[in-house]
Image (spheres, rainbow, N blue to C red):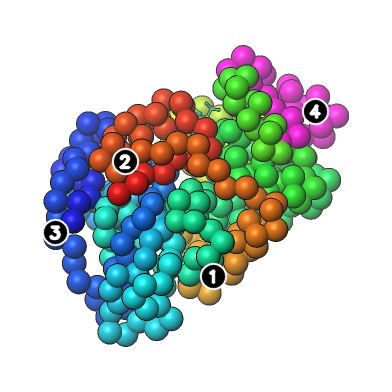
């Protein structure tokens, strides 16, 4: 038996239960990982609330973790018992002591990166890799807008943008978060709790607006984001922290300047082991060079996952939060 977080019905953090379960034996192409640290991500709250649908109820939760391979399936190649590994996609169940997942969702973890750092950076860092380097290949000198710049994904985006010579304008909801985003490498911040974002973007870009806007906030910022994209530019809508964007009339893209919009996912970009490894190699390279610092802002015991989710949803966290089994 092992311990995990599970839920029997959708709802608020109170539906999360910490209890015993019987971990499965790995199938032929699967690996069982003994988690040493687990990443907390906004997507976990979507599966809990029912915005996203888990395969079945009761369900386990979480897609990001780091640990040691504890058992391997008969057909697995490239991973052996005792290997240090990390993962950011795959089946739900990272909020656990032991997690079974397909071997092609794993990457080997360099000795220089601790389990805690890996759990803090895998999902968020790989997301920033594809957002800044694949969805739109940013060039140095460009000015971009990135919402929730002091958050988990946002903190890594600030650092990566700076390393690329990109001027990142970050939105934040407080002076403390503005200071954090600037310390992480943002070029400017806008406090969207009281400033007019579109107006400030016009001022900061001398009227040009941004070739690309990254929006993980969703419902509350959708229209403002469109107003910040330069003609024929791209809006990357990659999350729903304030609720999902729905009921979009495509004509709005014409009205706002012949814009493009995409709704990408990490799973869609890291959809083969080759692609996942290449993205992880670049991420680990950024960490090794010192361009990306992996700080853990908040730590919770796994059994306190509900409290961690309350803090994340209440906008009380900055940077990365991890859970410790
Ligand atoms: N598509 C993908 O591949 C992918 C991958 C990873 C993450 N994401 C998305 O990226 C976003 C950030 O994820 P994260 O895990 O790093 O979270 P996070 O940024 O640490 O937390 C979310 C932040 O969103 C801001 N926010 C604005 N309105 C909010 C509201 N009504 N409720 C709660 N927060 C609100 C808050 O920052 P302020 O207080 O400064 O506003 C909050 O701190 C999420 O939408 C997530 O789903 C998408």
**Residue 277: which numbered mark, if any?**
1
Pick whichever, 272 or 151, lies toward us.
151
Q: Is residue 256 magenta?
A: no
Which quadrant would the N terminus be assigned to in this image?
bottom left
Query: Is tag 2's residue or tag 4's residue first in the polypeptide sequence?
Result: 4
Q: CA distance from mark 1 to mark 2?
A: 29 Å
The crowding category of the residue bearing disc 1, from other C-alpha atoms within 10 Å (few below 14, some 14 to 19, many at least 20), is some
x, y percent for residue 80: 37, 78
x, y percent for residue 205: 81, 32
SS label for mark 4: helix
Q: Is residue 142 above or below residue 129?
A: above
Query: Is tag 4's residue or tag 3's residue first in the polypeptide sequence?
Result: 3
Residue annotated with mark 3: 1
Q: Is mark 4 within 8 Å of ligand 1?
A: no
Q: CA distance from mark 4 to mark 1?
A: 37 Å
Of badges 4 and 1, nearer the viewer stands 1
Q: Is residue 204 magenta?
A: yes
Q: CA distance from mark 2 to mark 4?
A: 42 Å
Q: Are marks 3 and 1 in contact (CB under 8 Å)?
A: no
Which range of residues does the magenta coloring cover? 186-210
Query: Is tag 1's residue or tag 2's residue first in the polypeptide sequence?
Result: 1
Let me know if residue 291 appears in the view.
yes
The crowding category of the residue bearing disc 3, from other C-alpha atoms within 10 Å (few below 14, some 14 to 19, many at least 20), is few
Residue annotated with mark 2: 301
**Residue 43: which numbered mark, if any?**
none
Pick whichever, 291 or 232, lies toward us.
291
Residue annotated with mark 4: 204
Kindly identify the residue that appears in the image at 49 percent across and 56 percent down.
114
Pick whichever, 143 or 202, lies toward us.
143
The crowding category of the residue bearing disc 2, from other C-alpha atoms within 10 Å (few below 14, some 14 to 19, many at least 20), is some
Left or right, 164 with reference to 9:
right
Of badges 3 and 1, nearer the viewer stands 3
């Amino acid at each position: 038996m092992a311990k995990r977080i599970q839920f029997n019905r959708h709802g608020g953090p109170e539906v999360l239960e910490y209890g015993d379960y019987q971990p499965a034996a790995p199938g032929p192409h699967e690996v069982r990982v003994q988690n040493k640290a687990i990443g907390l991500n906004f997507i976990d709250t979507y599966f809990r609330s029912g915005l996203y649908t888990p395969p079945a109820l009761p369900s386990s939760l979480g897609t990001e973790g780091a640990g040691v391979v504890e058992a391997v399936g008969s057909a697995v190649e490239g991973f052996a018992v005792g290997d240090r590994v990390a993962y950011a996609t795959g089946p739900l169940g990272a909020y656990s002591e032991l997690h079974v997942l397909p071997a092609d969702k794993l990457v080997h973890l360099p000795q220089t990166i601790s389990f805690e750092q890996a759990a803090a950076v895998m999902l968020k860092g790989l997301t920033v890799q594809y957002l800044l380097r694949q969805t739109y290949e940013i060039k140095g000198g460009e000015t971009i807008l990135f919402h929730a710049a002091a958050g988990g994904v946002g903190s890594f985006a600030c650092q990566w943008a700076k390393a690329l010579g990109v001027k990142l304008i970050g939105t934040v909801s407080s002076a403390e978060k503005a200071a954090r985003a600037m310390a992480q490498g943002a070029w400017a911040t806008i406090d969207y709790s009281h400033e007019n974002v579109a107006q400030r973007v016009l001022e900061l870009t001398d009227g040009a607006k941004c070739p690309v806007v990254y929006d993980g906030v969703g419902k509350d910022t959708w229209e403002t984001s469109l107003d910040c994209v330069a003609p024929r530019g791209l809006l990357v809508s990659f999350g729903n922290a304030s609720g999902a964007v729905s009921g979009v009339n495509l004509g709005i893209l014409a009205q706002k300047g012949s814009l493009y919009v995409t709704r990408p996912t990490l799973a869609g970009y890291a959809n083969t082991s080759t692609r996942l490894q290449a993205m992880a190699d670049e991420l680990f390279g950024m960490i090794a060079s010192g361009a990306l610092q992996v700080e853990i802002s908040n730590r919770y015991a796994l059994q306190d996952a509900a409290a961690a989710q309350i803090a994340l949803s209440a906008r009380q966290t900055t940077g990365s939060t991890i859970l410790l089994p």
